[in-house]
Image (spheres, rainbow, N blue to C red):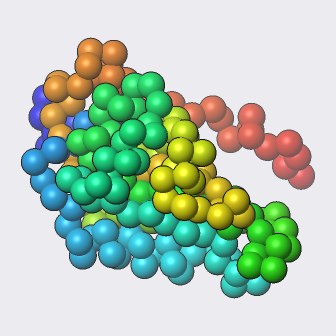
Amino acid sequence: MGAATLDQSATTDHPILDVLVERWSPRAYDAAVAIDEQKLNSALEAARWSPSANNVQPWRFIVARRGTATHAAIVESLMGFNQAWAPNASALVVAIAETKNANGDEQPWAFYDLGQAVAHFSVQAHAEGLHVHQMAGFDGAQISEKFGLEERFVPFTITAVGDFGDHTELPEALQEREVAPRTRRPIAESLVVND
């Protein structure tokens, strides 16, 4: 089963946009394909225009293309099995929350807004034919040190982005995860109140 035939579309209980049905988080990336700069820029533009409380935009990104020193530094920060697959991605994007402004005032909504920016990035990237996979398994302190981030900037996730590759080249345990059925709990289990 090759990249073109692996369909991991969600089975939804209610209709949603096709781009959301088809969006999934693979671990198989084509290590021979460079990132399409226009598609990457469109995804970053979508992040730029995501909702933001008071238009503060408390997000920053480190964008690293495969083959660069920046990419290698980010790969070194990855933990566990993320190091087995993520280096093949055409680009790695570190999502950073600005938890305090330049005056030192707390921005308690920073992680929420950052999450929206990354979600917009992900959906736009998928609409452009790219695949993304968000990771929390990395050493944030190492990222902060390597890139000289002030304490108020908190690396929160890393997103792998690129073209889907051959999942049979992944380690066996990851191959199984790549083709496993996608599941979500029922909506009712997520609703605390639904009057």
In depth, the one of 82 and 169 nearer the eye is 82
* Residue occupying image coordinates x 60% and y 45%: 141
The quadrant where residue 185 appears: top right
Q: How many marks?
A: 0
* Quadrant location, the N terminus: top left
Work out whether 106 lies above or below 53.
above
* Residue occupying image coordinates x 85% and y 49%: 194
The reply, left or right, for residue 128 in relation to residue 138 is left
Decide if residue 116 is in sight here. Answer: no
The quadrant where residue 128 appears: bottom left
Decide if residue 171 is in sight here. Answer: yes
* Residue occupying image coordinates x 77% and y 69%: 100
The quadrant where residue 122 appears: bottom left
Q: Residue 153, percent across and down?
A: 65, 62
Q: Residue 78, percent across and down?
A: 44, 37
Q: Residue 53, percent across and down?
A: 75, 77
Residue most extreme to the bottom: 55
The reply, left or right, for residue 57 in relation to residue 139 is right
* Residue occupying image coordinates x 29% and y 54%: 69
Work out whether 106 lies above or below 23.
below
The reply, left or right, for residue 157 in relation to residue 33 is right
Q: Residue 56, percent across and down?
A: 70, 81
